[in-house]
Image: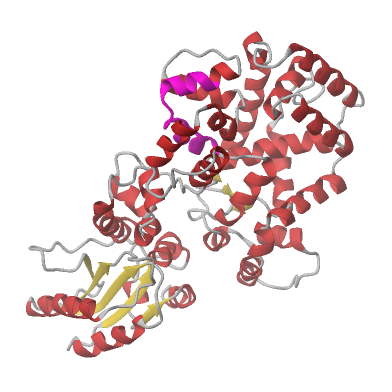
Amino acid sequence: MKAEETVQYMTKMYLERIIKSLTQDYPSNKDAEEYREIVKNNLTKLSSRTDLNNRLNKFISTNQRDPYANRLLYDFILRSILSKPDFIITQEEINEFVISKEKEILHLSEEPESFRHIDENNINIFSAILETALEDGTISTDELRLIIKLRKKLSISEKDQYLIQAKLGLFPSADCQVHTSTQVSKGIDDLQKCGIIFYCNQYEDSSKKVFVIPDELADSVKAVLGIELIKYKYVLLLQRFQNKQLQEVLRERNLYVYGTKNEMIERIIHSGIKPSEALETITTTELSDICSKIPSLNVSGKKEEKISRLIKYYSKLIIKSFKEDNTDQKYYEYLEELAIRDIDNLLGNEIIKDHDYIDKAFEDGTKYLFREKFNIPLIEFSGNEHADGGVVFETGDSILLWDNKSRKNGEPYKFPDKHLRQFLRYINKEKKKGRRVSCFLIVTDQIDPIAEKNAVKLKAQSGVDTDVAVVSAENLKLVAEIWQKHSSKEKFNLHILNITGILNWENLRERMSWHE
């Protein structure tokens, strides 16, 4: 969820927490809407990897007696949110994730198989250092720096450290007790005060309260945690491997190499093997073969370049949640990617099978938006010469038509003359049926200011004073997600879109406030 949408679900108290993470010097007599603007105006600072890490470290050093133990808890909380496709999670889901992960590590620490890939001498050395550091029940910041350096020299991963600590009876705390729900709640509050987690206490009309890492902050959070790929993206990468390649990755770590493909993938991830380490195991030729199956990736270059290329590709995949049996909802969730023709995300997530289906999927996703999000029945058209979709205004005496135009050649939409003639035919066809087109909406991606010229021209040529609006899929989808915050009605007010020109987010938000 983008920050623009996230802040709409937050009341003043929780917006203030985010602002306080940046500065104590802010106007305290503002209302919630003004606080939302302050947060949005500071997104660059909030999302900066350096600033985010500094905020976290400063909070830990200033407010915590045991920086290591709290950092560990924060790590699990943040990973719980990043494990969700949209980075949206409930309190109960965070509790379940943190406690289950800690129990899993405690259980694995009792299995000899968990340590097979680590040299026994290295385990003994590292165990002695950990026991010494934890003699006073805590690991200081300086001790933690030393432990991380030693861990790298001994080829011990962070997860291996957790397992060794648990074996020593020192994970997640000195008495091997998993965190309680109260302790997890305290950790969540701390991360809000660090300006990392946003609490949407009015999500879905307050019927559901959720915690969110806004999309703009997600990459920096991953970098601070040392995450190359979030689990579900790592799974997508490993699914590109052949079984024999997965076995080689496991064999390198002295792990059990048999089982189904899914079992081997899960074993690789659970062992703490990083994506770069898994890719390093296979040959340069095999890496080229994987790259060749991804349209945008170059197959040439050094091995490290191919590894970096693949990790970057999968890290940029936008994974969104949807019901598997609802294809139109899937297209709606990826509406922005369809508008921009983002072939990497669309093919990488198997949203479409090939380039040729982008336009149809874009149309179907927009139909879902009007039908399910705006709660307005669609007009049924016959034949081939008609707009991509249409709905009737509440008064019943006029209609809104829309047409989808995905981005071509990487350029913003300019509203060419051939589209003007095309849309005029659609308007005239409806006129002959006795239906006045009050608004013609063009749904696209980025919009060139020149598009406004033909919007005004089409309005003049329509003969029925049709308003012609151009809107990005991103802004239209954002309206679909939050319009009910501005209205108590069951159906969306189409007059919000009934204007001639380019509908940017500022005037859309203003028009929603007019039509409560």
- x 66%, y 21%: residue: 105
Residue 253 position by quadrant = top right
Quick one: 350 or 474, which is closer to the camera? 350
Measuring from the top left, give residue 238's x and y in whole percent.
Answer: 47, 31
Quick one: 447 or 247, which is closer to the camera? 247
Q: Give the range drawn in magenta.
A: 230-249
Q: Colour scheme used in the picture?
A: secondary structure
Left/right of residue 359 with respect to residue 126 in the rendered view: left
Left/right of residue 201 with respect to residue 27 in the rendered view: left
The quadrant of the rendering that contains the C terminus is bottom left
Measuring from the top left, give residue 111's x and y in whole percent.
Answer: 64, 10
Most common SS among magenta residues: helix
User: Which residue is outermost to the top?
Assistant: 112
360 is higher (above) or lower (below) than 142: below
Measuring from the top left, give residue 368's x and y in whole percent.
Answer: 29, 55
Residue 358 position by quadrant = bottom left
- x 76%, y 38%: residue: 71
Left/right of residue 273 with respect to residue 333 in the rendered view: right
120 is higher (above) or lower (below) than 223: above
Residue 397 visible in this rendered orientation of the protein: no
Q: Is residue 406 magenta?
A: no
* Image mark count: 0
- x 73%, y 57%: residue: 51
Measuring from the top left, give residue 330's x and y in whole percent.
Answer: 34, 48
Residue 37 visible in this rendered orientation of the protein: yes
- x 88%, y 38%: residue: 142
User: Which residue is outermost to the right?
Assistant: 136
